[in-house]
Amino acid sequence: MIIDLERGSLLDHLFRLPFEFAVPDLLFHRELEGPVGKRLVALGLRIEELTPVELARATAARRSRSDLSIADTFAFALAASRGWALLTGDGGLRSLAIDEKLDVHGVLWIFDQFEQGRQLALSELHISLTAISSHPRCRLPTAEIGRRLARYSSE
């Protein structure tokens, strides 16, 4: 998800939304540490350490869902135990979150938040979503992309 937001030049804007964003320390150190991670922390990203109970929940999730990475199970356990919404672009993690009745959102939800809060002009959203959706590794639903691009063009 971070990669998509970076492709769309939206990382700086993300932290202007009326939400707080956090990642488990393991996920940060494995996937974000470096220039991008430093930038995210400077923008407001929080790095959270799992409690022993949360770690046990992550371990149980990993045992039951071997398709998930350890970092994914840490993110799930953190969100589940603290009552937070989960942001993910991973289908397996989304499925687990839905099974566990967690609020789960993805990149397109972020676009909706920008649009509803009038955080960005529709033309900017169009440019960003076009950049994300034109990448060969984009896995966002084509129909949803099309609906948003049409809306961003028409208003």
Image (cartoon, rainbow, N blue to C red):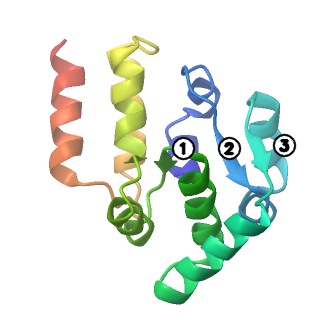
Identify the residue at horizontal 20%, vertical 52% (top origin).
142
Residue at mark 1? 84
Quote the CA–CA distance across marks 3 and 2: 14 Å
Q: Position of residue 83 (x, y in %)?
A: 54, 45
Is 38 left, or right, of 60 in this rendering?
right
Q: Find residue 38 and name its label.
A: 3
Identify the residue at horizontal 49%, vertical 44% (top origin).
85
Amino acid type of the residue tagged 3 in the rendering: Lys
Amino acid type of the residue tagged 1 in the rendering: Trp
Instruction: Say if 93 sits above or below 104 in the image.
Output: below
Comparing 146 with 73, the one in front is 73
Tag 1 and tag 2, C-beta contact below 8 Å: yes
Give the secondary structure at mark 2: strand
For discs 3 and 2, the disc positioned in front in the rendered view: 2
Q: Residues within 10 Å of mark 2 (few under 14, many from 20)?
A: some
Q: Earlier in the sequence, mark 1 or mark 3?
A: 3
